[in-house]
Image (tube, rainbow, N blue to C red):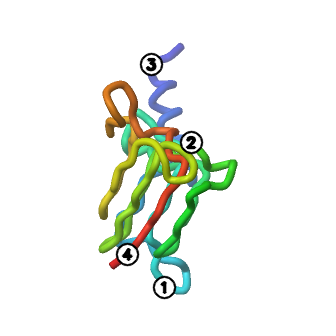
Amino acid sequence: MSPLCPVLLALALAAVPGVRAACPAPADLKRPDGTRTCAKLYDKSDPYYENCCGGAELSLEPNTDLPFLPSNWANVASSLVVAPRCEITVWSVRGKAGKTRKFSTGVYPRLEEFRKGIFGDWSNTIASLYCRCY
């Protein structure tokens, strides 16, 4: 195989819209009508930060309280973004039980990097949440 082939493939993938994902800035978390979004959860992360925040997304409005996430989102989130002047509290067990952690305003592209106890991390372990803005 020619050494030029991988370069051409990379250029082709970069030119196709929607192939690469990138986390939005916290200030960009707004609905089309301009109203505020508290946070967004994403079901895809990647070892490369520029490819994180991909796949399906779950938008949370301010004061969203979900002690039981929808079944297709329980233990699925692997990236999240929290809007300015907002914070999200997450639990590892449905019904707001188990381990807990607060994420404040910011971008968290790889929840694998945030420890949950001695041996675990927060990727694919969020089972309930509360998102508030102040």
Q: Residues within 10 Å of mark 3 (few under 14, many from 20)?
A: few
Work out how far the residue at label 3 is from the one at label 4, CA to CA, in angstroms.
51 Å
Work out how far the residue at label 3 is from the one at label 1, CA to CA, in angstroms.
47 Å
Q: Residue at x 31, y 27 (%)?
A: 118
Q: Residue at x 48, y 47 (%)?
A: 97
Label 3–label 2 contact, CB within 8 A: no
Q: Which residue is mark 1?
A: 34
Amino acid beneath label 1? Gly
Label 1–label 2 contact, CB within 8 A: no
Q: Nearer the viewer, mark 1 or mark 2?
A: 2
Q: Quadrant of residue 69?
A: bottom right
Residue 113 shown left or right of residue 131 in the figure: left
Q: Residue at x 30, y 74 (%)?
A: 85
Work out how far the residue at label 3 is from the one at label 2, CA to CA, in angstroms.
41 Å
Amino acid beneath label 4? Cys
Q: Which residue is mark 3?
A: 3
Amino acid beneath label 3? Pro
Work out how far the residue at label 1 is from the one at label 2, CA to CA, in angstroms.
30 Å
Residue 65 position within the rendered picture, expressed as x and y whole percent measured from the top left: 53, 67
Q: Which residue is mark 2?
A: 75
Specify whether residue 14 is in view. Answer: no
